[in-house]
Amino acid sequence: MGQKKLERFAAIATYPNVFQYPENMQGKWHSFFGNAHPIVLELACGKGEYTVALGGKYPDQNFMGVDLKGNRIWKGATQALENKMKNVAFLRTQIEKIANYFEPGEVDEIWITFPDPQLRLSRAKKRLTHPRFLRSYKHILKQDGIIHLKTDSPDLYAFTKDVIEWCRLDLLMDMPDVHSHTHVPDYLYIKTYYESLDISGSNKIFYLRFSIPEGWRDNEEAFTAYLKSKYKNDEEKAGQS
Ligand SMILES: C[S@@+](CC[C@H](N)C(=O)[O-])C[C@H]1O[C@@H](n2cnc3c(N)ncnc32)[C@H](O)[C@@H]1O
């Protein structure tokens, strides 16, 4: 491991705003923040651009960036400390385990910012909007809690729209090209590190806002079968090329 990474790991171990695989924090986040304000998560936060920017914009809400990589979290956590932001924190863990860290209903909103699109069908279960993840999100979100997805991947956008329809979720906003709209919520202009890289080459930013109602179609096995039948031909073509 490089020297810089080691220094960052050592730093976040001392930071009061970074929790690394914490035990027994479920149900205690409002006490940590010292208020009863809404709690908003940014999953796959990387350097935490959304967490820090939203924290500055909305002092009456609490924001938590979640990522596996401590050296990335270091960036946002350092900025939040330097700016004395009391409503910003970071949680280092795997998103697969997110339901272990919050009580049911403790979270108000979830942002998913430029997650890896996991393009191969065999990796669909790793996409952060797959029903496998939605079940955890539903568990920790309050009733009618909102999920935001911002991505530059047309594939992840199309997949998530499929999920929304198949799982009978409530679609609240759908922008297939954020910058072509005249009325855009100003928080969509916050730019993340990966957004600036434009890895997908789509030159577009896609945004979806949705919620998971009671009685959503929570059947991972049936969804997997649906997905396989829908994308079978594409996968066969990819195998031949
Ligand atoms: C493409 S980057 C996006 C980072 C940031 N949101 C941005 O837009 O710059 C994806 C991030 O997701 C994190 N990640 C991927 N899978 C994860 C998982 N299962 N649990 C926690 N973090 C994960 C990676 O560490 C990485 O920082």
Image (cartoon, rainbow, N blue to C red):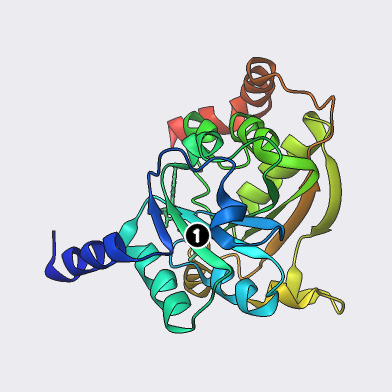
Give the side of residue 32 with respect to residue 12, left or right.
right
The answer to whether residue 133 shows anywhere in this view is: yes
Residue 16 point in image, percent of width and height = 39, 64
Q: Based on the displayed image, in which of its 4 quarters is residue 160 positioned?
A: top right
Question: Quarter holding the C terminus?
Answer: top left
Label 1 crowd (10 A; few <14 / some 14-19 / many >=20): many
Q: Quadrant of ligand 1?
A: bottom left
Compare residues 194 and 154 and report the one nearer the observer: 194
The image quadrant where one finds the N terminus is bottom left
**Residue on which the image places disc 1:** 45
Tell me where residue 126 appears, x and y as whole percent. 50, 36
Q: Amino acid at mark 1?
A: Cys
At mark 1, the secondary structure is loop
**Considering only vertical position in the picture, is 50 above or below 21?**
below
**Pick the front one: 117 or 97:** 97
Q: Among all residues in the image, which is located at the extreme bottom? A: 83
Q: At 76% from the left edge and 61% from the top edge, which residue is drawn?
A: 176
Instruction: Identify the residue at image location x=38%, y=44%.
Output: 21
Whether residue 42 appears in this view of the structure is no
